Image (tube, grey):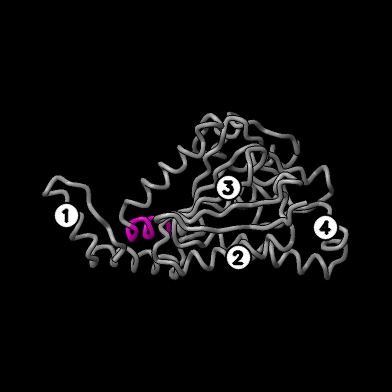
Amino acid sequence: MAEPRVTARVEDHTGWLTFSNPDRLNALTFEMWQQISEHFAAFAADDAVRVVVLRGDGDKAFISGADISQFESRRGTKDARDVYNQATYAASEAIQNCPVPTIAMINGYCIGGGLGVALGCDLRIAASNARFAIPAAKLGLGYDFTGVKRLVDVVGPSFAKEIFYTARQFDAEEARAMGLVNRVVEADALEGYVRDYAETIAHNAPLTIKAAKLAVNAAIAGTEPANLGQVRDAVQACFESEDYKEGRRAFTEKRKPKFRGA
């Protein structure tokens, strides 16, 4: 069996994060949760990265959930659960707080913790063969407030209850109808579509996108002074940037702007 792992690479301005545990449909081990945090810290420190795409290894699954084979050793006692939950929380926060846009490229199964990872992303683009579920009610698991709130923020309370209460799998079209995913494309076109989307984002003004992401996140989290202060500072940085000058020049000269993120 191949060793479960999360790998990362950067191509042009796009960071690619791949979940690889193909023998278990890319189920996340404890060690993989830890690796997510490490890779996102590296992406955040790399000025060349303007967008991050998360994907599963192969075409059968994005992430099929947490690796249940570890539950006895990693989640069998309160102390063990506390350590495990800290790792999953840190990974989720790293995704949620990534300073650049994030896209979940979803092929096949996106279940449980895998759906939680996808919900932490800014955009979710799914193949027509994608399947979504939170099977906690079939396993006796409890979900904490943070994970539930992210689902509610995306699909609303009624659909969130349906997903949890039924624990059933939803297909890609049902997911789109809920607002759970942004786009659905044929499986053989998924990677090309996501690459084009990532490239479009990467060529837009990074400071503008950063300000927009902060503003949307503040709208979700609540308009507290600290959140609004971050948004104001980010907006001001846009107007003081060389990119703002470049955008005006490019418009006047009828050409595509070349933004540097400064």
Q: Residue at x 74, y 35 (%)?
A: 168
What's the amino acid at mark 3? Arg
Q: Which residue is mark 1?
A: 248
Residue lying furthest front in this view?
A: 1
Q: Which numbered marker is on residue 37?
A: 2
Callout 3 secondary element: strand
Instruction: Point out the tag, 3 or 1, that comes first from the N-terminus.
Output: 3
Q: Main secondary structure of the magenta part?
A: helix
What's the amino acid at mark 1? Arg
Judge whether residue 194 can be spotted in this image. yes
The magenta stretch is 206-214
Q: Which residue is mark 4?
A: 70
Q: Position of residue 162 (x, y in %)?
A: 69, 37
The reply to whether callout 3 and callout 2 are in contact (CB within 8 Å) is no
Spatial CA distance of label 4 from label 1 is: 55 Å
Spatial CA distance of label 2 from label 1 is: 38 Å
The reply to whether callout 4 and callout 1 are in contact (CB within 8 Å) is no
Q: Residues within 10 Å of mark 1 (few under 14, many from 20)?
A: few
Q: Position of residue 156 (x, y in %)?
A: 58, 42
